[in-house]
Amino acid sequence: MKETIAVMADIHGNLPAFLAIKADLRKRGIEKVIVAGDMISDCPDSDEVLTLVRKSEWIVIKGNREQYFLDHQAGHLNHWTHARQMSALMWTFDKLGRSNRAYIQSLPDQKRIEIGGISIRITHGSPDSLSELLYPDRKRERFEEVMNALEEDLLICGHSHNQWFLEQEGKWALNPGSAGIHFNKGEGAQYALLSISEGKLSARLISVPYSLDELEKRFHDSGLYQASPHWSRSIIDSLREGENISLLMIDYALNLMEREGITDALTIPDPIWDRAGEEFLKNRNRG
């Protein structure tokens, strides 16, 4: 008997993208869903996304963004509270309702399941770390090390926002891409359909179109853009241009810090962050 399971990760509070995927799943008649973490932060509607996930009967683990919330709640990241670099995260944390805060507490770091005779390890980064980036091409040696140590038939991971499915010496690995912050030039919210039949695996990598204009309006209407303008702009531009502009902006800020001789800051100092956002984004738009 063939079983089909939807797999998504890295929703990042992008409600229009998430609803587009949900509508696509309804159209296809898919009810079984795996969510491999990072449901919150960066886009405006983390609480709304998390509520919908929490009320589902899906298989869900936490990602590094949920772990950031737990670490901050425990007092381990107090230096983030007033740093402009972290203002989007602080805004998101403040908007989370009580039920969703408790839900995050309940989520496991990873999970092992079995479907149709296939054993599956669900992680966000890697089996060793929520924040590890697995790249089958760029970091091949590390990827092979992880796959050789894997005891299950299939590894599901996210975090890199790169969409791929491949076999490694009789085992399989799947990254469904990013549902919410996808670097595919606006082609749409990414997820995967995993099919299991008679002990055999196959997967389809899917992108679902939705309105980026609607998402950008949500940034402004929600107040997130006003709370964290540089980060919000970089996220919107990343989605439209198909490139991780947020990371490039951080690199620009770190280079400014190095030129200023700042080596002991726990976060990027506010004047550097503002300068980086203004200069970097303005230069990109001018180019």
Image (cartoon, rainbow, N blue to C red):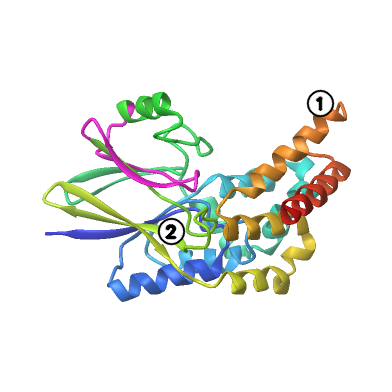
Q: Residues within 10 Å of mark 1 (few under 14, many from 20)?
A: few
At horizontal 60% and vertical 74% (from top left) the residue drawn is 214
Mark 2, Cα crowd under 10 Å, few <14 / some 14-19 / many 20+, is many
Q: Earlier in the sequence, mark 1 or mark 2?
A: 2
Camera-side residue: 236 or 194?
236
Q: Residue at x 51, y 55 (%)?
A: 182
Percent coordinates x, y for residue 216 in the rendering: 65, 69
Tally of marks: 2
As shown in the figure, which amino acid type bears the numbered disc 2? Gln
Query: Residue 190, which numbered label?
Result: 2
44 part of magenta stretch: no
At a point 81% along the width and 26% down the height, the residue shown is 263
Name the quadrant containing residue 22: bottom left
Residue 49 percent coordinates (x, y): 53, 66
Assign a secondary structure to mark 2.
strand
Specify the label residue 263 is tagged with.
Answer: 1
- Note whether 80 is above or below 100 in the view shown: above
Tell me the kind of residue under disc 1.
Thr
